[in-house]
């Protein structure tokens, strides 16, 4: 299914007629926005099912925080966190994505019922990732990434952030294709907040058309991120805490859906589920209006 903006569909996933909503389940004690709240398997599975009830089309399960400055968990611990949650949600019929930079976690998650691999490193962190996903025939999210952010170093240096992110994503997509993942299974993500400051993130959101011109379905993951805190900061310059950025997140969801994004990735689902449905209704009204306008012009002749 494609809309006026070329939203596209992804082989191996349902075809939604609007921007999809990916709900986030962080099975971590230290996520920046909801660390520790869904840390045990039972709570995490229940939370994922709650997100679906609130309108999530798919659920992204991750066992390793990627916030700036986070230390990596070891492989066994990541597997212990993630696999039971993936299995539990998939067994309930949920469309499950796994958020991991490790090929072993991706392979085990796909075997446990996940249907999408969301790798914030775009396959750069683990050289086995791309062959593993290719062998499984799974869809793959390629995010723009410039390496691990040790010590909380978030700011990359860009002369033209939009051009550079587009060019670097294009190069990564070529590498992923060369590694055997087929073109109809690749999603791109500009990596908001990863080696980017607020101005970079806003510039990318202002030019989603340039990212869509890559010709791949686009995932926008803005939820609760630092740049929204900057936008919402009070007169004293203090940003609201992460959990108070959900209304702002849903505004980005509406903008992304209107621009033609394939999906938005969010922690709080209901407002974004409403936002993408409103954007879709407006798109339909525009299409209907064009048809009516053309018919009226024809009749006037």
Image: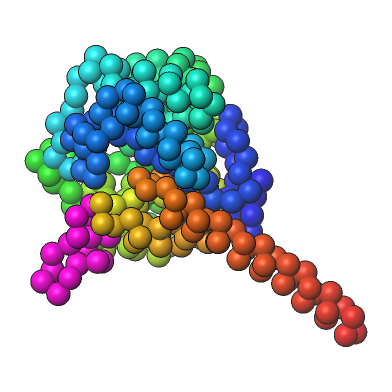
Please name the residue shown 34% across and 29% down the image.
44
Q: Is residue 20 left or right of residue 120?
A: right
Q: Which residues are magenta?
A: 225-242
Rendered view: 115 above or below 69: above
The spot of residue 100 in percent (x, y) is 33, 28
- 271 to 45, vertically: above or below: below
State whether residue 271 appears in this view.
yes
Q: Quadrant of the C terminus?
A: bottom right
Residue 297 percent coordinates (x, y): 83, 81
Is residue 65 visible in the rendered image? The answer is: no
Seen at 37% across and 23% down, the residue is 85
164 relative to 184 in the view: left or right: left
9 sits left or right of 179 in the view: right
Query: Is 240 colored magenta in this rendering?
Result: yes
Where does residue 23 sit, x and y in percent of width and height?
Answer: 41, 41
**Is 276 located above or below residue 106 in the figure?**
below
Can you give x and y, in whole percent of width and height, for residue 146 in the image?
26, 42
Residue 36, picture quadrant: top left
């Amino acid at each position: 299914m494609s809309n006026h903006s070329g939203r596209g569909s992804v082989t191996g996933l349902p075809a939604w007629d609007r921007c999809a909503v990916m709900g986030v389940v962080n099975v971590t004690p230290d996520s920046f926005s909801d660390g520790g709240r869904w840390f045990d398997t039972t709570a995490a599975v229940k939370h994922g099912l709650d997100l679906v009830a609130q309108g999530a089309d798919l659920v992204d399960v991750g066992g390793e925080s990627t916030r700036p400055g986070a230390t990596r968990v070891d492989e066994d611990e990541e597997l212990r966190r993630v696999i039971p949650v993936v299995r539990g949600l998939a067994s309930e019929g949920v469309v499950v994505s796994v958020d991991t930079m490790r090929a072993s976690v991706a392979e085990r998650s796909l075997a446990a019922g996940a249907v999408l691999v969301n790798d914030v490193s775009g396959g750069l962190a683990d050289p086995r990732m791309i062959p593993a996903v290719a062998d499984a025939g799974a869809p793959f999210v390629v995010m723009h990434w410039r390496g691990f952010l040790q010590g909380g170093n978030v700011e990359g240096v860009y002369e033209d952030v939009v051009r550079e992110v587009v060019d670097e994503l294009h190069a990564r997509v070529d590498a992923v294709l060369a590694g055997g993942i087929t073109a109809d299974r690749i999603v791109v993500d500009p990596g908001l907040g990863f080696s980017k400051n607020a101005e970079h993130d806003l510039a990318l959101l202002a030019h989603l058309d340039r990212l869509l011109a890559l010709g791949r379905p686009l995932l926008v993951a803005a939820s609760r991120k630092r740049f929204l805190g900057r936008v919402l900061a009070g007169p004293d310059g203090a940003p609201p805490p992460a959990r108070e950025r959900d209304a702002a997140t849903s505004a980005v969801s509406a903008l992304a859906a209107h621009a033609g994004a394939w999906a938005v990735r969010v922690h709080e689902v209901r407002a974004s589920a409403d936002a993408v449905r409103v954007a879709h209704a407006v798109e339909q009204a525009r299409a209907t209006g064009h048809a009516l306008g053309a018919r009226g012009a024809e009749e006037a002749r």
